[in-house]
Image (tube, helix red, strand yellow):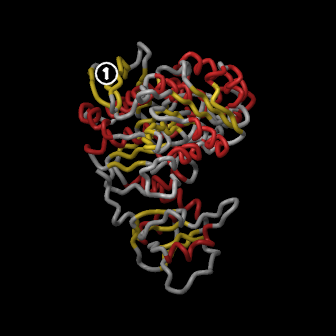
Amino acid sequence: MNAATENLWSASEAASATHGDTVGDWVASGVSIDTRTLNSGDLFIALRGPNHDGHDHVQDALKKGAAAAVVERAYSNVPDNTDLLRVDDSEQALRDLAVHARARTPAQICGVTGSVGKTGTKELLSAALDAQGNVSATAGNLNNHYGLPLSLSRMPANTDYGIFEMGMNHAGEISPLSKLARPDVAMIMSIESVHIENFDGIVGIADAKSEIFDGLLNGGTAVISRDTPFFDRLAERARECGAAQVWGFGMHSLSNARFLAADPTPTGQHVQATIGSKHLKYHLSMRGRHWAINTLGVLAAVASLGADLDAAAQALVHVKPPKGRGEIHKVNAEDGAFAIVDETYNASPVAVRAAMEVLKNSSPGRGGRRVVVLGDMLELGEDSEREHLSLANDITAHDFDLVFACGEYMPGILERLTDDMRGGAAPNSEELAGLVAKRVRSGDLVLVKGSFGSQMGKVVSRLMAMDATRETDGDA
């Protein structure tokens, strides 16, 4: 159940939270910092960024139906009788609303971080708890110094469970987010070499992720991947920060939430696991062992929050892959149908290997091939070339039929493959899309994967444009 938001912020409560002055007697049903996504009834907060000043968009926000605008006191370019909340610093006002929203609710809060799997885990946990109370969760991946306080400020007072994602690119970024959210349960899903160029090794990444425990309520619970070699280091940090209990989840024999088996089905997979002393069987609508293991962290959190485990496990079947994270698109081309596995949201070495593992265990259509289309993985620093080339070993081991690659580093893997596996290479995704479109055929199962900045979505769009049954102009 989604928490009601009709009276999210009254003018008086928002003024009290931010030490601001109100103009007008307004009530807001939401909070926004971007006029492009603003809904009627939102409280628009005009933030001053390095490239844009939200004060330049106040008039547009009001025309789109904003209940009021939060503006800094120095700003005067508004018509008379405009509903406002005047503050000294609008960014601080956003944080103040977040602090007040957290304080006014008895909700149990779960914070989620990890090198990979944050957003999917947040969606799984939201679904697991949805029938057991009012749930407020991060929308999309709003997990940074703006996104987290924005998500908290949108949390209604009658929330039972709050689920908030926390991300980082550098050390020191998660700690202030955790201190805002003050989670009862703090989860670390994985530690991998993502954003490694900003750190002095993967230990630095582990320590940065452990900052999520800085805001953990005393006596709270830490949920940590038991399969990471940094488990003991992370658990020690959690206990130093006041965690009364540490749950380990994964395949490790000492996991409190332990993976037992996963059997693929036409619609996903059947999973077996033990959560504490309880044995569970449930179905997921996503394939891949990484998804199954993520659900163990989810169910460990559910147990820590005191919610019903059986109901939570059965609710997981309703979760579909988030956009660009394993969506399957069927294309009815003129020469026959084929399928696309859309993994274009982001990429890291561990995520690419997980996606290829799913492809290996999936069956193409009659006469079809397993085709891999890869773009560069970004933010790997000095390890970029080595990490990209190492994927060739996995491709060969999985015996894929055809491989395409684009970018600065990824095309190098083709040199390590047999001639019949080399589909083609290009400097960018737009040019690669044309090469793939010429070679794809009926029955093929095509995995498209790359970092968001590699723009591999262009490949998906080009292939989907081949659908003869579509009534659009081909843009996906």
Q: Tell whether 404 sits left or right of 162.
A: right
Name above or below for residue 93 compared with residue 204: below
Q: Residue furthest right?
A: 382
In the foreground, 272 or 23: 272
In the rendered image, which residue does mark 1 sit on? Answer: 272
Side of 434 relative to 293 (left or right): right
**In the rendered view, would you say 38 is above or below 285?**
below
Q: Position of residue 4 (x, y in %)?
A: 31, 59
Q: Can you give x and y, in whole percent of width and height, for residue 125 in the image? A: 37, 39
Rendered location of residue 387, percent (x, y): 67, 25
Find the residue positioned furthest to the top. 253
Neighbourhood count class around disc 1 (C-alpha, 10 Å): few under 14, some 14–19, many 20 upward: some
Secondary element type, mark 1? strand
Name above or below for residue 165 compared with residue 62.
Answer: above
Q: Which amino acid, mark 1?
A: Gln
Q: Residue furthest bottom?
A: 80
Give coordinates of residue 164: x percent, y percent.
45, 45
Asked where in the image residue 67 lies, by quadrant, the reply is bottom left
- Tell which of 344 and 318 is nearer to you: 344
Q: Residue at x 46, y 35 (%)?
A: 442
Q: Is residue 246 visible?
A: no
Looking at the image, which residue sits at the far front?
Answer: 335
Q: How many circles with numbers are drawn on the protein?
A: 1
Taking 272 as reference, is 333 above or below it? below
- Frontmost residue, 374 versus 379: 374
Whether residue 135 can be seen here:
yes
Please give the name of the residue rendered at 41% of the width and 30% of the height, measured from the top-left corner.
365
In which quarter of the view is residue 429 placed? top right
Seen at 33% across and 42% down, the residue is 127
